Amino acid sequence: MTAPATAGVPLTAAQLALWTEEQTADAASNSGYLAVAFTGPLDERHVRTAALAVLHRHEPLRSVMRATPAGVRLLVLPAAQALSFRRDTLPLPDAPGGPRRAVRSWWERTEQTRGWDLATDGPIRFALLDHGRDRATLVMSLHHAGFDGRSKFLVARDLTAALRAARSGTAPPLSAPLARPAAAVPDPATTAAARSHWTRVLPACAEPLLLPGTTAPSGGGVRCSDQVLIARPDVEALRALAARHRATTFTALVAALGLQLAAYGNRHVPLAVAADVSVPETRDVAGAQINVVPTDLPLDPAATGDDLMAEAAAAVARLRTRRHIPFPDLTRALADPCARPALTQLGLSFPRAPRDLDLDIPGLTADWDFVSPNTASTFERTLQIRADWPDCTVRLDHRTENTGPEQATAFIDHFRRALHRLAHHPAARAGDFVLPAARVRGPARPAGPQDAASSTAAALPAAPGPAGPTWWQGPPDAAQPVEAALARLRGTAFTTGGPPPDGAPVRRLCAPLAAAGTASRAAPGVRELVVPFDQLRLTAALARWAGDGRVLGAHWIDDGTVHGWAALPGADPVRPPLLTPAPGRTATVHGPDGRALPAGVPGRIAVTTGPGTAAPALTGHLGRITPDGRLEYLGRDGQRWLRHRGFIDVPLVERVLAACPGVDAARVEARATPRGTVAVAVAVTALPAAALRAHLREHIGGHTLPGRIDTVRAPGDNP
């Protein structure tokens, strides 16, 4: 039944979340597009008629969200009022793959940045791009407030039927409107079982998944990797494996993903699937009938590929039985503030086209693109899989603050490798599947000092001299209270933090720092300042005390052994410090089971001291190797993460907070309160906590911020 345009119905929890996000978003999020490229004579009037027929047929596609005295309501508009249709000209390049790339670039340049006003714009907008020479592309921009992956096939089917009718001069066969479907009611026993299951599993998710990643400022939105075609022999072998296990191909794809995640060092992973929750009565209705359904996958290095298939089958079975439990209701019932971030780290999308999909139009060639970009931000990363057997394509949609384009490309390459391994060697152990390991080698010989603001880690001077850097042998305890650290920086005390390299000049900086008096004055006689790398969180204050206003670098010391040098990569405090091994040494990053990891995946840093060394020596520090071969320092093993309303990256928050003008030093700690453990940031500053939180929000996402900020004044500062 059609909802009156003046009354409306309340929004679902998911729709309300999308509406709220769009009120504050700077650019379009939760959007994507569907495109069809036409070759042959095409009349714009026929396309408009077909678009109107689709809107008339599907009420969710002509619905808007408006604030009323009774709350935000979903209102259904007449098709003619809801239609958004425009025409544009887009020349196409002649290079292979050029047309789809050109359309994607047009959409990103014009539609993605346009944003949505959900009070006036329905969830679909039409644009007809004229390429000349009887070629055109119809681009349908889509918003997830009223659209999902399943709906693409329904719109393609109905638009094709309406366009066929318009070209032949007959009435469109889509006259009866299909109303917005009612939400399915989950079984109470199934809901209770899901809640009990996740209450047991979630506490084990104390840290984020180990995945190829980066650290970048927040606010970059969602980007998509290129879609990649899986080799047909691998697809055929995987489908044969699924048949032997009497399982679906989707189950085998989940098992391949599990093998990949195990190679990264993960042992028990939560996965979330964008599941179709339509029922036979609503299956023909376009609109948002998708629910986020979490499941989990235990990963044992000793398990074979056949064992992974069994685990994947159990995970898929949980998806089927729990797909009607609304995700917001589930996370709210768990009473765990970290539930949503933990369960939405990695998503999986696998919509399937109906078997009877008829997209033929006499006299016109239509090439549909069902794997176009998607900026939905529900998941941090979404593995998008599309299949038209025996063809199967994959891509990764990802938030830019934790995954860059190189890491997304690597993730897809690793998935292809894991799928090949599982399909052809199902009896092999998961622990024997090794991805290409990344390595960072030290320079051939010591280099001269370099500015830490450059992209290369600073190296130590080859010989001492009056013009060389002054080595600060600072306090050995990186976890000391900030107040004590600041007092020592101001010259009250110093202890040895570890031996400097042979021949390096060592001067205690008590007198120069004490003479500086305040952080606003330069310390006389200090040309360059070098600090132990695990105290780089204090470098913002140190740089203001140093005579030339810069911190050159630091020794990389672990248990008294000098492994190399460290430096900040630049002025951006979000970027981690960089480590460079000493000459003749090689650094690698290892997972919990000792396997060396590929570029981008975080793990424990190990150093090989020479070609004759039997095994790399673990250093007790965390890091990851960038695609261009640099080693990023991510903190001490076991001290990087705090679990609060999200996963709080302790070194990152300390680094960003210490870089705020007016902050002398900062730390993050877990503090017990009557309401549970809270992540607290402590800053030595005269600034108010509100200013510090605003500074953090400029660089870091909201759910990864500490729940509380305390400020203390430095010893000797006047109130």
Image (cartoon, rainbow, N blue to C red):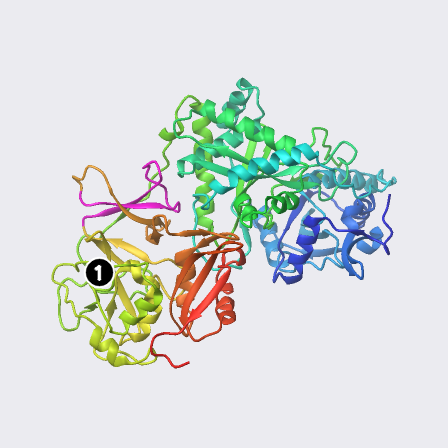
- Along the line of sight, which residue is nearer the eye, 404 or 24? 24
Q: Can residue 38 be seen in this view?
A: yes
Residue 120 x %, y %:
76, 59
Left or right: residue 245 compared with residue 714: right
Give the vertical position of 391 relative to 272 (above or below): above
Quarter of the view holding residue 526:
bottom left
Amino acid under disc 1: Gly
Residue 227 x %, y %:
53, 41
Which residue shows up at 68% across the image and 52% down it? 129
Write down the region rendered in magenta. Answer: 584-610
Residue 139 x %, y %:
68, 49
Which residue shows up at 56% across the image and 38% down it? 198
Which residue shows up at 85% across the image and 42% down it? 177
Which residue shows up at 12% across the image and 59% down it? 502
Left or right: residue 229 compared with residue 284: left
- Along the line of sight, which residue is nearer the eye, 207 or 676? 676
Q: Tag 1, which secondary structure?
A: loop
Kindly identify which residue carries mark 1. 497
Q: Is residue 599 magenta?
A: yes
Mark 1, other Cα within 10 Å: few <14 / some 14–19 / many ≥20: some
Q: Is residue 446 magenta?
A: no
Q: Which residue lies furthest to the front in this view?
A: 674
Residue 2 x %, y %:
86, 46
Left or right: residue 365 compared with residue 462: right
- Along the line of sight, which residue is nearer the eye, 163 or 228? 228
